[in-house]
């Protein structure tokens, strides 16, 4: 109908269709809906009307004045939302304010009852039907999320969610229609489009059907985006290689899940090899790339040595540091700085780091014989470990002792021979000339007296005893050398064989970093070690000794040993140092709940949370129970008894409970074991926030 019909009749005819200009329509005071339509609902109606015109007429009645005469306006009895949508279209200039609106004139029924009836007597479509219809529009008409959203007045993100839900297995959609699963559970299944996998997980669901458990089971074979491998490769590179990233449109998925773990591992190794090739250009003999660090490499490690900066570099370092401090004064982060200031500060920081890196360098001989491991760090970055020398390369570098001796003995210069023997055996030239060296029995007798004298003298000089002890421990733990005279043997048990991944924990990294800091300060040749230790100030020497002593601790309980006294001593030591294992260990499925019985899991929840919580999870299957326990106890600070430290004053005869199933080994690294070193002598072993430091401790 092209003509606009405006009815202003004294006695309008009820039950006919009329066209009323938009600006002649008003909201009825008898409208049953007191809470108005929301903006989103009006937007959706406006979009629908714009693309498909108005599907349903408005129901109106004429407005009259106090005398009962028509005013020329019409009151909308039913369809106020559609009137608001048309007004929104007029505001956007999609239609004119005088646009004719198709209406149904009703003067027979009570307007208030009509309005109530419209809002009450109707049944909403089941959400599953909507999901499937959206999916059909996408599949059959080729419409994308933007097009569908525009036609129905919803955001593209909402359309994507509904399309994802519509793509869930038809079997699960039907279960949802029958109230067999909730909408939250259906959204969890939508994380993957694999119908067979969805149905398999559904069939295996137990009493606990928490959405997070469904998501966990569906992505059990995938790699989360926060995994170090995924962070190292990156989503773009993985996608370019043909990998698929599974995204969860309904929860925060932290970047999704990388579907092909094999492809991801291959990309990680390829990228690590590229880094290894760059490091190899430094002159190293070899560079090996692998995802995990080969802790059982059996090689000796050499560290970089201190190098004196040139006067030019020293001056520039001082100047750049002062300029950096001046620019950053008053700012707590780069975000607070003006763009030009931030760029200048960042450039100065890079320059300072580059100059400071010149303070240390590897011996060219070590580079020529040694190699580098390039592995993946837990932070998702390449971890470069330099200075490892293979045993066969060590032999090539060190002349054979027997060959050297033969060369000396075969010489013609008797003075040179006598001088060498005097230095090595304490003999003098006359004795060599007489051909009568000191008898071995006498040498043993004399050196026994010398040993007795050393014991007596050292026992009267505690400070020197500390130096000798430190020298012996450092010789063994850092140099693997026997260049010490104390009959003290120390070893450092490798904990990786007892607890997988322990070297990559925060405590493991802190201990390795502390060891690395000291290793870089020590002289390369063990012959120079005594002078180095003597030159340390007392505090630094104490810290070095404490570090060496700490490496010798072994409180691991293994099934085939019955070591009660060492474990009791370890308990006393833990009490003495106020060891708090909550700083180094957290109960998770992997670290505890998945490795003990359901009874132990229930006991832990009962202790840390509540008896009611323990009762709620008791009927669950073991995997679900373990997962739920991890969630419940995430921030409780609970520890199994084998990790708890006794109070300083325990009742007499107290014995700590030992749980055989929970006997796990965990490395103890406590920064408060000893007094901190001085700034001038001892290395700074603090691990700064946001940085990850690695080293190989006591190979």
Image (cartoon, rainbow, N blue to C red):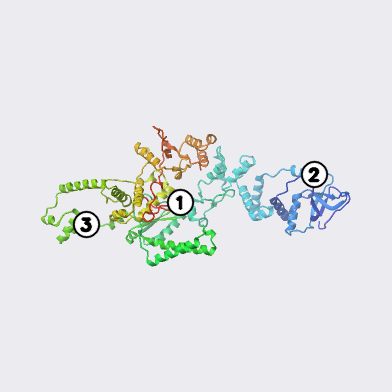
Q: Along the polypeptide, which appears first: circle 2 or circle 1?
A: 2
Q: Is residue 574 left or right of residue 66?
A: left
The mark total stands at 3
Q: Secondary structure at mark 3?
A: helix
Along the line of sight, the residue nearer the viewer: 122 or 693: 693
Q: Is residue 437 left or right of residue 245?
A: left
Q: Who's the residue at 41% across and 66% down the image?
A: 315
Give the image quarter of residue 422.
Answer: bottom left
Give the image quarter of residue 124.
Answer: top right
Q: Secondary structure at mark 2?
A: helix
Image coordinates of residue 146 in percent, x first then y, are 64, 55
The label nearer to you, 1 versus 3, is 1
Q: Secondary structure at mark 1?
A: loop
Q: Along the polypeptide, which appears first: circle 1 or circle 3?
A: 1
Image coordinates of residue 299 in percent, x first then y, are 34, 52
Along the line of sight, the residue nearer the viewer: 553 or 222: 553
Which residue in the structure is indicated by mark 1? 378
Vertically, is 317 above or below 670? below
Which residue in the structure is indicated by mark 2? 112
Q: Who's the residue at 52% across and 54% down the image?
A: 243
Image coordinates of residue 260 in percent, x first then y, are 50, 51
Which residue in the structure is indicated by mark 3? 403
């Amino acid at each position: 109908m092209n003509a606009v019909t405006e009815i202003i009749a004294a006695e309008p005819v009820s039950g006919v269709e009329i066209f009323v200009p938009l600006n002649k329509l008003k909201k009825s005071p008898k409208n049953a809906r007191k809470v108005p339509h929301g903006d989103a609902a009006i937007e959706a109606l406006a979009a629908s009307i714009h693309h498909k015109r108005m599907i349903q007429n408005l129901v109106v009645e004429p407005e009259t004045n106090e005398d009962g005469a028509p005013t020329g306006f019409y009151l909308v009895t039913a369809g106020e939302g559609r009137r608001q949508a048309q007004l929104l279209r007029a505001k956007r200039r999609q239609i004119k304010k005088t646009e004719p609106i198709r209406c149904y004139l009703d003067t027979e029924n009570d307007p208030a009852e009509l309005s109530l009836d419209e809002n009450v007597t109707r049944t909403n479509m089941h959400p599953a039907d909507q999901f499937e219809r959206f999916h059909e529009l996408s599949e059959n008409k080729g419409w994308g999320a933007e097009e569908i959203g525009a036609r129905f007045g919803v955001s593209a993100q909402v359309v994507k969610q509904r399309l994802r839900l519509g793509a869930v297995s038809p079997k699960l959609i039907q279960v949802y229609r029958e109230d067999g699963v909730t909408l939250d559970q259906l959204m969890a299944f939508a994380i993957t489009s694999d119908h067979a996998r969805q149905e398999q997980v559904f069939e295996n669901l137990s009493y606990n059907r928490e959405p997070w458990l469904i998501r966990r089971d569906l992505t059990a074979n995938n790699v989360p985006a926060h995994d170090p491998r995924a962070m190292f490769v990156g989503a773009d590179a993985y996608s370019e290689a043909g990998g698929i990233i599974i995204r969860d449109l309904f929860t925060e998925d932290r970047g999704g899940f990388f579907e092909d773990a094999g492809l991801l591992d291959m990309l990680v190794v390829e990228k690590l090899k590229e880094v290894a090739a760059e490091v190899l250009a430094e002159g190293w003999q070899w560079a090996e790339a692998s995802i995990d660090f080969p802790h059982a490499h059996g090689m000796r490690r050499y560290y970089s040595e201190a190098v004196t900066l040139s006067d030019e570099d020293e001056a520039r370092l001082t100047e750049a540091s002062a300029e950096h401090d001046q620019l950053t004064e008053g700012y707590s982060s780069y975000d607070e700085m003006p763009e030009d200031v931030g760029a200048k500060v960042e450039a100065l920081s890079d320059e300072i780091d580059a100059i400071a890196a010149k303070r240390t360098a590897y011996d060219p001989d070590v580079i020529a014989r040694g190699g580098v491991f390039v592995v993946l760090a837990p932070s998702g970055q390449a971890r470069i470990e330099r200075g490892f020398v293979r045993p066969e390369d060590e032999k090539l570098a060190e002349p054979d002792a027997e060959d050297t001796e033969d060369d000396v003995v075969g010489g013609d210069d008797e003075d040179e021979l006598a001088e060498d023997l005097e230095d090595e055996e304490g003999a003098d030239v006359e004795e060599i000339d007489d051909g009568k060296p000191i008898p071995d029995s006498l040498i043993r007798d004399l050196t026994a007296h010398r040993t007795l004298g050393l014991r007596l003298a050292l026992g009267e000089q505690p400070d020197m005893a500390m130096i000798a002890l430190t020298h012996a421990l450092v010789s063994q733990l850092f140099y693997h050398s026997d260049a010490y005279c104390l009959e003290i043997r120390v070893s450092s048990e490798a904990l990786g064989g007892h607890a997988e991944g322990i070297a990559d924990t925060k405590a493991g990294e802190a201990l390795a970093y502390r060891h690395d800091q000291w290793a870089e300060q020590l002289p390369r040749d063990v012959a120079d070690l005594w002078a180095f230790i003597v030159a340390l100030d007392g505090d630094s020497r104490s810290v070095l000794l404490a570090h060496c002593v700490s490496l010798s601790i072994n409180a691991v309980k293994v099934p085939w040993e019955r070591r009660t006294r060492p474990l009791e001593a370890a308990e006393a030591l833990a009490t003495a140092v106020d060891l708090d294992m909550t700083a180094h260990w957290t109960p998770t499925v992997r670290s505890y709940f998945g490795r003990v019985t359901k009874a132990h899991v229930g006991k832990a929840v009962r202790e840390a949370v509540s008896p009611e919580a323990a009762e709620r999870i008791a009927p669950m299957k073991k995997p679900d129970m373990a997962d739920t326990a991890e969630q419940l106890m995430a921030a409780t600070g609970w520890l199994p008894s084998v990790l708890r430290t006794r109070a300083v004053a325990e009742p007499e005869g107290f014995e700590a409970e030992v749980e055989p199933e929970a006997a796990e080994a965990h490395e103890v690294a406590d920064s408060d074991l000893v007094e901190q070193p001085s700034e001038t002598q001892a290395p700074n072993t603090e691990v700064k926030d946001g940085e990850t430091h690695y080293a190989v401790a006591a190979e």
